[in-house]
Amino acid sequence: MRPFIYTPTSTVSAATQKLKANPHAKYLAGGTNLLDLMKEDVEKPTELVDITRLVLTEVKAITTGVNKGGITIGALGKNTDTANHPLIRQNFPLLTQSILAGASAQIRNMASNGGNLNQRTRCPYFYETSMPCNKREPGSGCGALEGINRMHAIFGWSQACVAVHPSDMCVALAALDAVVKVQGADGKERSIPFTDYHRLPGDTPQKDNTLNPGELITSIEIPINNFANTSYYLKVRDRASYAFALISVAAGVELEGTRIKQAKIALGGVAHKPWRALEAEKFLIGKEATEANFKQAAELEMKSAKPLEHNEFKIELGKRAITRALMQAMTGGKA
Amino acid sequence: MEKAFIKKVQIGDAMDRVDARLKVSGAARYAAEYTLKSVVYGVLVTSTIAKGSIKEMDTRAAEKAPGVLAIINHKNAPKVPGHQAGTDNEGSRVYGQEFRLFYDNKIYHNDQPIALAIASTPEQAEHAASLIKVHYAQEKHQTNSKANTSNAITPARGKDYSRGTAYAFKNAPVNLELEYGTPIQVHNPMEPHATTAVWEGATKVTVYNKTQATKLSQQEIMKAFDLKEENVQAISPFVGGAFGSSSRVWPQEMAAIMGAKVTGKPVKVALKRDQVFNMVGYRPRSIQKIGIGATAEGILTGITHEAFTSTSQYEQFTERIVDPTKTLYNCPNLNTAYKLIPLDMSTPCWTRGPGETSGSFALESAMDELAYALNIDPLALRLKNYAPSDPEKNLPWSSNYLKECYQMGADRFGWNKRTPTPGSMRKDEWQVGMGMAAGIYKSERDAASAIATVLANGSVVVQSAVADVGPGSATIFTQIAADVLAMDVKQVTFEWGNSKLPKAPGQFGSHTTASVGSAIYEVCTLLKKKLQELAITMPNSELARAQQNDLVVEEGTVGLKNKQIQLSYADILKSHALPQVQVSTESKGGGPEQEKYSGKSFCANFVEVRVHSLTGEVRVNRVVSAVDCGRVVNKKTATSQVYGSITWGIGIALMEEAKLDHRYGRHLNNDLAEYHVPTCADVPPIEVLFVDKPDPVIDPMGAKGIGEIPLVGFSAAIANAVYHATGKRIRELPITPDKLL
Ligand SMILES: Cc1cc2nc3c(=O)[nH]c(=O)nc-3n(C[C@H](O)[C@H](O)[C@H](O)COP(=O)(O)OP(=O)(O)OC[C@H]3O[C@@H](n4cnc5c(N)ncnc54)[C@H](O)[C@@H]3O)c2cc1C
Ligand code: SF4
């Protein structure tokens, strides 16, 4: 617990200017992640710039341009409102399912969409300030690498960090080929494809994503797709609700006749970012939508997985979860 | 005069809780919610190493921080006379030297409290605490039970047990030797521990704490600070769950008392969630071996149960881990051994069904494994080995309706629909399994006192120091008093949760109803007699010529059986010109009559689970819990106790596990996001069946205990159901999806 300045703002430019002026300031949205981390002395901002009054809460259909038919979601929309918006329920049920699989009703009522993207890992060593963690304190070592790493990564990890990104919503957004819209203090807007938004740890695990310092997420765009009725979000966890994923799968299958035109598959709980299952996707193009093919796709995808001491089970679980998610997608997403 | 209709509440009625309104409206105050005038706040700083000593503690920055009143540590803490005296093992409930807060620079466990930052606001105290810098001389620690079984000791207060031939299972026609394990589980009551302490002068202290035993709190504080009984008061009417974790005086009480002494102001100390994990007890990890043998017909011929649990380096905490094994079945040859592994951890503490819960997981899993080895139905195996009397004490049961539990439970559950082969029941992608287990738990009665007072307006106040940590004791004591005094329950007030009230035992061991309930039953019976005497002797009494036997007490009156004369309690007092009439009693604990019998509660739990055939998630479909707890005093509160036990059992079976990183000897999942307890979605419909037959020996109500018995064996019932669903036997809890792939 450290003293900090609280600064409310009401415009995007005022907010971004504040962060430019104070590199130790942070945006405060729902606070469900940031405030917890401040209490644990993991995040130590000297100033909180409250962005909850910014008018960036709308969910809107995109009516012009290349993404016509798609949807744009305000960064400060609440997770609950986003999940339950009629346009999203109808056209992007995968997103609805993923959001509702996360956290608790109370937390989703507070949590913002932008905050969900930028929530930090749940690696317990990251939270435990008496133990080493490169993400919290670069150069201190990775507590999890040879510690208790049952919940950690099997893809894309480095010696520096083996953490996973905890979000469910982001797994669906990765499968949905979303685009993140951000704006900096210079007023310029950038569009970042979702799969490039979060990063792998490499030697700089302190950087979760490709946002530049002080940049604000303004919205998220999702293009229209043809698998609203053949998609499913599966989350396998240690209890029925209110637990982070052991593994999660966002799956959408677009059919042409009985054959698969394209499949979109992303995995959660396996890497430092939502993991697009590109091997599996590639294999499935043009194949019949059968359990055998789904299994084979899953096998292919998990081939490159590298387990740690306590999470070898994720490889087998991943295969089964991918198969199960694809099967359930084919039955219209019914569990 | 027209008489209002008075609804009489009886023992056994499903009466609503007397404090329900206070609780749901937020008016009930818990330990951290007393806002005394000029109260200040203390935050505990805890160690970040598991073993060693403090080389240096730099408190300068903290002392200068805004709002700070004091930083207390081992260098400047007020002397605690009881700490100097050394240990008095005779009287102490746990063998060894209790933890002494701020006594010296030694570190016995990670998260050990080493300093208290006191400031005007909680935030300032929190900030000051974060500014304290500590340098340690670290020593090599041990926190892993499994790696330290070779250092296990035989507890000073524990004896190995044997009847018949030891290790006889080895020679049985069918025998198994199996190893089971349960992890550390933390009570994690909703309300974290907190205390506000206030001194009056140098000799009188009052604490508002979270305790299951106000009298024990009072005595421990008297002993520590060398104070007189009348000068120490512990006040704790509302407790947000405790489950054993509030049965001792802990560092937050000691810190608040020391802090109040140093600052001369009331000091409030509340633990943070992570501090609850290694400071106020936990259920220790267990490592257990069971050898079990039977004839081909399924008659048990030998059981051996060897168990290890862990303890701290300064105390020997033992629990009843091998007790169910000694008495649940009629096995002629049986031996048990119990060893403790001292670790660099805080001392564990009694946790709901302390010992029985872990021990019965092993025993009731082994019974299931034996049933499969014998190709006998698991319920049939248990019936064959039913113990007609207590095989350990060689005494008749005071009452035992375990067979009725089996019968009722199996009928309601539909046990006969179970197909025996593992993996033979399926619904869609889910494998379905049915499992069951039995439970046994001690049923005891302790000495307790109570006072009952009838006031001039005819209403009655009953008092006892007993705590009500959530089970609804205040409600059933109101109910018992109203029943005995035959009056409107609204005219009865029960006062509890304060050490200045008549002495009561702690609320643990499922013996509150039997102990305190008996005292209340007795004191109200005395009051009734007194009122009858007064009715006869009052001036110009219409009952002057009546004998006590002719009189009936009903509807708050003393009168004749034919109802022609009915004198209200208020009128009786008025005609004697008495402002009140008070009686008190001290009810005995187990007397000679009770020593002729063995008293136990029993249960049989039936569980249906489904396990996803691909991804291994276990969901509990339904539970039927059949319980013999003697007479049910209040159907509603008793049912809630079963719900609570079953919910605990689901947590223990499927998810609860405090994880330590042994490299640091420190908990990793010490918050409620990562330490999993069941959510609503994890708890299915629970059907509760009570035998509801009074125990003729234990107490005048016929009530045995209910708070813990349904938990005993329950985690095994789930593990057995998982085996039935999948053919996979999980002997190491919790049963998480990864273990079932
Ligand atoms: C107990 C618990 C369980 C949970 N379980 C799950 C789960 O199962 N699945 C899941 O997906 N999530 C889970 N969550 C996480 C939850 O979804 C996130 O905490 C939430 O989405 C964060 O949103 P927020 O608005 O509260 O963010 P904040 O806490 O306000 O902010 C988080 C971070 O994002 C930054 N930020 C916020 N908005 C913006 C913006 N517009 N532009 C740039 N930066 C921004 C902040 O500066 C901060 O660094 C859980 C959380 C808790 C506490
Ligand atoms: S995995 Fe990453 S977050 Fe976890 S301890 Fe290692 S560096 Fe820190």
Image: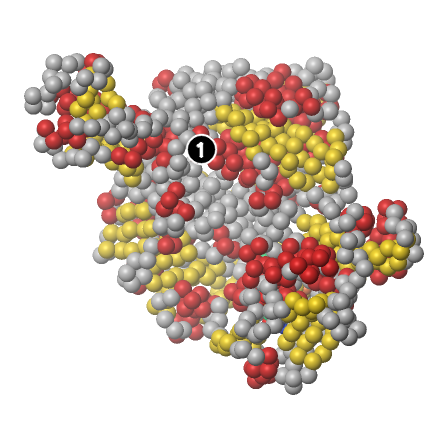
Nearest the viewer among B79 and A19 is A19
| Position of residue B659 measured from the top left corner of the image (x, y, whole percent) | 61, 50
Residue A159 place in picture, x, y as percent: 74, 65
Q: Amino acid at mark 1?
A: Lys
Crowd around label 1: few <14 · some 14–19 · many ≥20 (10 Å): some
x and y, in percent, of residue B527 in the image: 22, 26
Furthest residue in direction left, as rendered: B540
SS at circle 1: helix
Residue denoted by label 1: B636
Where is the C terminus of chain A found, in terms of image quarters? top right
Image height check: is B124 above or below A123? below
Viewer-side residue, B597 vs B376:
B376
Answer left or right for B561 relative to B718.
left
Q: Residue at x 42, y 61 (%)?
A: B43
Above or below — where is B475 with respect to B269?
Answer: above
Q: Is residue B7 visible?
A: yes
In the rendering, at what x and y percent does residue B330 appear? Answer: 58, 17
Residue closer to the observer: A97 or A44: A97
Q: Which residue in the rendered view is the most extreme toward the right?
A: A286
